[in-house]
Image (cartoon, rainbow, N blue to C red):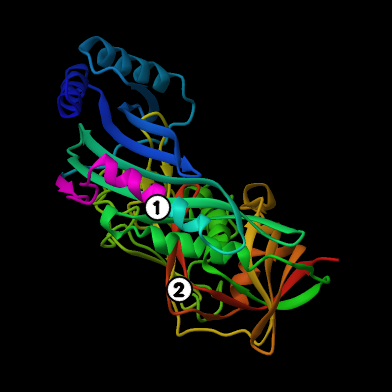
């Protein structure tokens, strides 16, 4: 069976059994090359996917999935989901009313190139980095792409599919100057193979790493801080759950009950937009079939919205923003798409710390309390100029408090994939932040 045939089969069988069901089919094709010192170390080719069902019986949800598209496997999946629904105690689930969503190809010819030309990119970025001054060795260079197909249907009328894709080119390296060693990396992500440039990726990887050589210890204190885009994207990626309608409804977000309040400084406008042209996480509809739309979460510092799916929207009496997400193997969650901090008019730092790299973000951030304490690397700025790199320090604070102390934003957005999201930020200037150093 094809994915579309499997979806139609499950919907027909569910209607025969008098069961409400939502069918999500996901198929991915992956291609990757890993090279080092001019040699190919690994080639990855994979096609994987499956069909997941969400059944609702008497307001109880049950889930099951299969990767075999045979009538026997699909029938078992439907029965398993029904049994799982009967075991649930919470009776709040429902399937939203659906509609025809169409069939969308957001990728087009974006990944249309030969495998040899893709391998050549990885080899070229490896060569270009090794040619840079102060680079001692390349730990790995890589090219990776994923083509993503989604098929959705429900007994309540949702019906649609889409195709997306993304390609990445990256390199890791070790740089040395005297006794000072630093390890770093850089990766570029695009929805088109043709937009990747190995020379640009190599230069940025070398620049980001070599500038940190010869670092000094940073004294403990409070200083103005300029977060580079990658560093702030990591923070925002750790704390986006504060805007999750599911977390808000469960009482796990400090933003509960604060719509219309000033929660950040005036320069801060936070947006999630699944309709962005060439967005790494753009999509025409969410995992429940709610059409995609741009959502302003914070406008000039004021909390305007949460990210919701149908159930959290109902619980909060809030509009459904279309941010339902699940894999075919998983349960329904809320997740962002292209989440970004709107750029400003440019910033400069007269004296303080440029925060360039954060480490241990997963362990050092508490999205419920909003607290963070993270090891970092950066640059000390004096008189508006970089004086020297700094290390052996941690940045500490409260994320919402940090947003209230943002005094300026850069004028250029940079995108960074983080666990569970793609985050775009400019440089972010914070007037005062606690640094724990020597």
Residues packed near mark 2 inside 10 Å, few (<14), some (14 to 19) or many (20 plus): many
Residue 287: image x %, image y %?
Answer: 31, 42
The residue drawn where x is 68% and y is 90% is: 383
Along the line of sight, the residue nearer the viewer: 82 or 201: 201
**Quadrant for the C terminus in the image:** bottom right
The residue tagged with tag 1: helix, strand or loop? helix
Residue that badge 2 annotates? 269
The residue drawn where x is 79% and y is 70% is: 218
Quadrant of res 403: bottom right
Q: Is residue 192 left or right of residue 108?
A: right
Residue 222: image x %, image y %?
Answer: 77, 76
Farthest bottom residue? 383
Distance Cα–Cα, label 2 vs label 1: 39 Å
Range of residues picked out in magenta: 101-124
The residue drawn where x is 66% and y is 66% is: 212
Q: Is residue 236 left or right of residue 214?
A: left
Along the line of sight, the residue nearer the viewer: 34 or 277: 34
User: Which numbered disc, 2 or 1, marks the residue that appears first in the sequence?
Assistant: 1
Along the line of sight, the residue nearer the viewer: 351 or 154: 351
Residue 431: image x %, image y %?
Answer: 66, 81
Q: Is residue 255 above or below residue 36?
A: below
User: Nearer the viewer's eye, disc 2 or disc 1?
Assistant: 1
Quadrant of res 278: bottom left
Residue that badge 1 annotates? 124
- Is residue 115 a member of the stretch shown in magenta? yes
């Amino acid at each position: 069976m094809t994915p579309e045939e499997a979806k139609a089969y499950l919907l027909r069988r569910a209607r025969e059994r008098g069961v409400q069901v939502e069918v999500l089919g996901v198929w991915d094709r992956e291609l990757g090359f890993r090279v080092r010192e001019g040699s190919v170390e690994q080639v990855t080719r994979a096609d994987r996917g499956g069909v997941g069902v969400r059944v609702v019986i008497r307001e109880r949800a049950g889930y099951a999935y299969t990767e075999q598209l045979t009538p026997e496997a699909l029938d078992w999946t439907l029965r398993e989901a029904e049994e799982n629904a009967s075991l649930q105690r919470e009776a709040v689930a429902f399937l939203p009313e659906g509609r025809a969503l169409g069939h969308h190809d957001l990728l087009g010819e974006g990944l249309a190139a030969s495998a040899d030309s893709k391998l050549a990119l990885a080899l070229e970025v490896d060569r270009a980095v090794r040619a840079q001054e102060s680079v001692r060795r390349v730990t790995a260079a890589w090219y990776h792409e994923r083509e993503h197909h989604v098929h959705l249907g429900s007994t309540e009328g949702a019906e649609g599919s889409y195709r997306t894709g993304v390609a990445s080119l990256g390199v890791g390296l070790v740089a040395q100057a005297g006794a000072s060693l630093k390890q770093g990396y850089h990766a570029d992500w695009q929805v088109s193979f043709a937009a990747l440039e190995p020379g640009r990726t190599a230069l940025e990887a070398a620049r980001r790493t070599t500038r940190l050589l010869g670092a000094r210890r940073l004294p403990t204190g409070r200083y103005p801080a300029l977060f580079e885009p990658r560093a702030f994207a990591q923070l925002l990626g750790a704390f986006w759950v504060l805007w999750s309608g599911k977390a808000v409804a469960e009482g796990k977000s400090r933003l509960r009950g604060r719509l219309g309040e000033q929660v950040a400084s005036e320069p801060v406008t936070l947006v999630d937009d699944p309709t962005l042209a060439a967005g790494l996480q753009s999509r025409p509809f969410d995992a429940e079939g709610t059409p995609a739309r741009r959502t302003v979460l914070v406008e000039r510092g004021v909390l305007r919205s949460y990210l919701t799916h149908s159930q959290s929207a109902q619980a909060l009496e809030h509009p459904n923003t279309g941010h339902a997400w699940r894999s075919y193997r998983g349960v329904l969650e809320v997740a962002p798409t292209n989440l970004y901090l709107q750029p400003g008019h440019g910033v400069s730092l007269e004296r303080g710390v440029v925060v360039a790299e954060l480490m241990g973000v997963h362990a050092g951030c508490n999205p419920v309390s909003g607290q963070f304490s993270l090891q970092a690397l950066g640059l000390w700025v004096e008189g508006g100029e970089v004086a020297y790199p700094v290390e052996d320090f941690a940045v500490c604070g409260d994320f919402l408090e940090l947003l209230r102390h943002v005094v300026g934003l850069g004028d250029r957005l940079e995108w960074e994939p983080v666990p569970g999201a793609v985050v775009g930020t400019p440089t972010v200037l914070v007037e005062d932040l606690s640094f724990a150093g020597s």
